Image: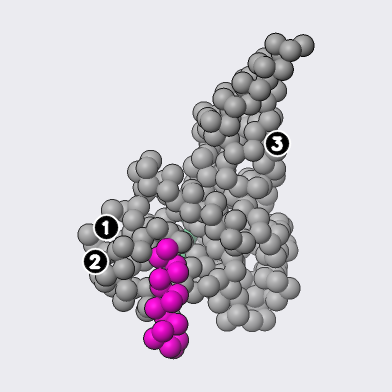
Amino acid sequence: MIKLENVSFKYKNSDNILNNLNFEVKDGEIVAIVGKNGSGKSTIGKLISGIIKLKEGNIFIDDVNIKDDIKSVRNKIGIVFQNPENQIIFNNIYEELSFSLKGLEKEKIEERIDDSLKKVDMSEFKDSDLYSLSLGQKQRIMISEVLAKKPKYIIFDEPTAMIDSKGKEIIYNIIKDLKKEGYTIICITNVADEILIADRTLILDDGKIAHEIKKDELIEKSNILKQFDIKEPVILEILRKLKENGIDLKSKDFTVDELIENLKGKLKNEKHN
Ligand SMILES: Nc1ncnc2c1ncn2[C@@H]1O[C@H](COP(=O)(O)OP(=O)(O)OP(=O)(O)O)[C@@H](O)[C@H]1O
Ligand SMILES: [Mg+2]
C-alpha cells in the first residue's frame, strides 16, 4: 500500500504545488493520476520514489514512513520516465541493465536480465545497441531495467508521451500484464487511453485530488475529464452517447471488440423480447 497523508510541497522559489494531498493506492491496483500541465503530477512521482525530499506530511510505503527509511522505499519503488533517452547511460543493453544490479552474482544478474527482457518482449535484443532501437523499444528497455530491480511498486510518468501509436499500445499491454503479475502501479498521464487501463483515476487540481473516478464510473463521469483538458477517449464518447440515448452497455476493457460483442448481445435480447 502507498499512502499519502496531508502532503504539501513547494520548490525553492515556487508557489505551493501540492496542498494537503491525500490518497491511497492499494496493493494490486493500477491508479492513474491526471491533471493539467504543471499541476504537480511528476512531483508526486518524485516524492513517492524518494527522488525529492518530502518535508510536509507523510508518505507511507507498506506502513514505513519514507521519512524514517528512504533506502528501503527506494528498493521497493521503480519509476519509468517520459523520455527514455534521458535515462540511458550505456549503449549496450546488457551493460545498461546490469548497471543497477551491481553487487549480485553474475548468474543472478543474467537471470534477472533475461526475465525482465522477456516481460517487455525484448529478449532478442539482449546484445544489441540501445541507439539502434526505436523510442518505443528504448522505453521497453527502460521498463525492463526497472523490473530487473524487482520493485513491488512501479510509477510510470507519462510513459508513452513521446511514442508512436503502435508503440503506445505495446506499452499499455505491458502495463496490463504487469498488473496481472501482481505489481501495483501508478500511471501519471494526460493521455486518455492510459486512463482506460486504470482501476481508478485521480484528478489532480490545485494541489489536491479534485475527483476520483472508478473504472465502472468512467462512462457516466467522462465529462469531468474534459473539464481538465483531457480529451475524452473515442470509445468512452461512444459509450456515453449510447447511454444518453437509452442504450446502456457496461464495459470492462473499453475495447471496440468488447463494445461490438455487448451490442450484439443487446440486439439479440431485444429480438427475443
Ligand atoms: N525543480 C523545480 N524547481 C522549481 N519549480 C519546479 C521544479 N520542478 C517543477 N517545478 C514546477 O512545479 C510545478 C509542477 O511541476 P510538475 O513537473 O510536477 O508538473 P506536471 O503535472 O508533471 O506537469 P507536466 O504535465 O508538464 O509534466 C510546475 O509549475 C513546474 O514548473
Ligand atoms: Mg510531468
Q: Amino acid at mark 2?
A: Asp
Q: Position of residue 235 (x, y in %)?
A: 54, 29
Indicate whether 100 appears above or below 14: below
Closer to the N terminus: mark 3 or mark 2? 2
Kindly report which numbered mark, 3 or 1, lies closer to the viewer in this rendering: 1
Residue farthest front in this picture:
272
Q: Are marks 2 and 1 in contact (CB under 8 Å)?
A: yes
What residue do we see at 32% from left, 74% from top? 94
Indicate whether 255 appears above or below 70: above
Q: Amino acid at mark 3?
A: Glu
- Residue 35, quarter of picture: top right
Q: Is disc 2 placed on a helix, strand or loop?
A: loop
Q: Position of residue 99 (x, y in %)?
A: 37, 79
Report the magenta stretch's main SS: helix
* Segment colored magenta: 102-118
> Looking at the image, which is closer to me, 174 or 269?
269
| Residue with the mark numbered 2 | 129
Kindly report which numbered mark, 3 or 2, lies closer to the viewer in this rendering: 2
Indicate whether 19 appears above or below 202: below
Q: Position of residue 114 (x, y in %)?
A: 40, 71
Q: Amino acid at mark 1?
A: Leu
What residue do we see at 37% from left, 42% from top? 166
Q: Per the image, is 2 magenta? A: no
Mark 3–mark 2 distance (CA, rounded to whole Å): 44 Å
Q: Per the image, is 109 magenta? A: yes
> Looking at the image, which is closer to me, 193 or 269?
269
| Residue with the mark numbered 1 | 133
What residue do we see at 54% from left, 34% from top? 255
What residue do we see at 43% from left, 88% from top? 105
Q: Position of residue 95 (x, y in %)?
A: 31, 76
The answer to whether one can see residue 52 in this image is no
Q: Which mark is residue 217?
A: 3
